[in-house]
Amino acid sequence: MEIRAADLGAGDGNDGMASLVRSLLDAQDDRLPYLMHRQETLTRGELRERVAKQAATFSVYGIGPGSTVGLRTPPSFTQVEVLLALWSLGAQVLLFDFRLKLAEVEHLCESCRPQFMVSAGTNVQATFGFRSEYEVVTERRGTGRPATTEHRLVQFSSGSTGRPKVVGRTARSLAAEVERFTRIPGMPQQGDRLLLLSSTAHSFGLVAGLLHSLVTGVHVVFASRVSARDILRTAVDHRITALFGVPMHYELLASALDPPPLPELRIAVSGGELMPVQVAARFAERYGIPVGESYGTTETGVVAMDVGGTLRPAVGRPAPGVVVRVHRGELDVALDESPYLHDSGGTQYGDGWLHTRDRATVDATGAVLVQGRADSLVVIGGLKVDLVEVENVLREHPAVEQAVVVHESVTEAYVVMAAGSGRPSAEELLRWCRQRMADYKLPRVIRQLESLPRTSNGKLLRQSAALQATATSGGA
């Protein structure tokens, strides 16, 4: 089924998002399954009814075109129907990751000032495992203000350092990205059963996972818990054909003991963070499926993708309609206008280009090779050191499963050991590094942790204070 952005009905103005929602809901037979968890199934027709019911309720609260609404619910059937309902009314939705603490949400709301907050009525922090439905509580906020732009989705950048940027997407932008995914070779198609592990509050999980699946007829399946056991059980029970996740999920599955065969799995894609080559290799050896890569940003959506994982270490070729360039060694993506709201973008957008701050090259075939963050470069004794290089050397040690290296006054390494590795000493790991790197690149401190802290999107956190706090609190 070929989908064009024009077919999705998204345009400018308050009706643009409502038009997109109608097109998404009308794209497939109402009888087809859409969302699945264990024995629960929500068909597209049932979703349509629930969206209409939620929209009617929100209208009573006065939510309509241009209203600003914060949405903070866990991944669930409810999250999807509420999001679509708010969009169908023309509201601007600020999509918060439910794992953010209330203080963090309130801090973000100081600049965004939503008029309403919609959240799960139960204590989501105490919830253990996936639930398909939640009671929804709507709160009117007296200090809120209506939208002043046509952006109808507002997200917060998931960078590992610094204050998140406020990023806006229009209906036209979202429609174009959904259409791009339909044109990328190898993407799941009608009838595929997609196990979605990626966060539905972030771009890859939301657009590639939920919206693309809705328009193409893919069945979206959720696992009960984020554990190798529950993910594999879900994959077997639902005869999963496709898997979307982040490197952490593939690490879990690659390390599983005696995993069952997954004969129908033919697509596995990692997004949100660059996939370590070693993790992809272990997963492919264990399950016989190469891991593809989707590279993008909150600001642009998908930039490049290699569903089949045949171009690694490249992340893929630019998605249809995406124009990139390498400028001063860093990757830029063409955008018609700045995606940043509330003056949060700094110098990251200018002259029609979004500066990703990722160091990259593009080869003669158009494949994009991302070489790490430009801000992973530090100067030590007048010499430049790439902290990602130090991390890669540590990961090459047979006992090291994960590594993060940070530099403030000194270079510090935090590592997680593989199960049954025997936990080599910091001195042994330092000797390993000394044999493979110049002395000025060596970490001064190496600490072993039980697990590395991550952002709400599953990315490894590269803040020295957070890593030190994890070590001090007993994570070592």
Image (spheres, rainbow, N blue to C red):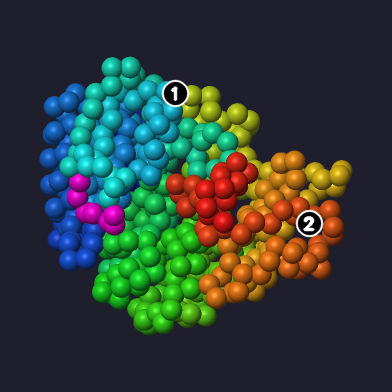
Disc number at residue 442? 2
On whether residue 145 falls in the magenta region, the answer is no
The amino acid on which the numbered mark 2 sits, given as a three-letter code, is Leu
From the image, give the main secondary structure of the stretch colored magenta: loop
> On the rendered structure, is 65 left or right of 150?
left
Query: Which residue lies at the image location 61% right of the left edge and 34% below the top edge?
Result: 348
For numbered disc 2, what is the local secondary structure? loop
Q: Which residue is mark 1?
A: 111
For discs 2 and 1, the disc positioned in front in the rendered view: 2
Residue lying farthest to the right in this orientation: 382
Circle 1 packing at 10 Å, graded few (<14), some (14-19), many (20+), is: few
Looking at the image, residue 101 lies above or below residue 200 = above
- Picture coordinates of residue 323 (x, y %)? 58, 47
Looking at the rendered image, the quarter that the N terminus falls into is: bottom left
Looking at the image, residue 116 lies above or below residue 20 = above
For numbered disc 1, what is the local secondary structure? helix
Q: Nearer the viewer, residue 25 or 414?
A: 414
Q: Nearer the viewer, residue 109 or 219?
A: 109
Label located before the other in sequence (2 or 1): 1
Q: Which residues are magenta?
A: 128-134
Looking at the rendered image, the quarter that the C terminus falls into is: bottom right
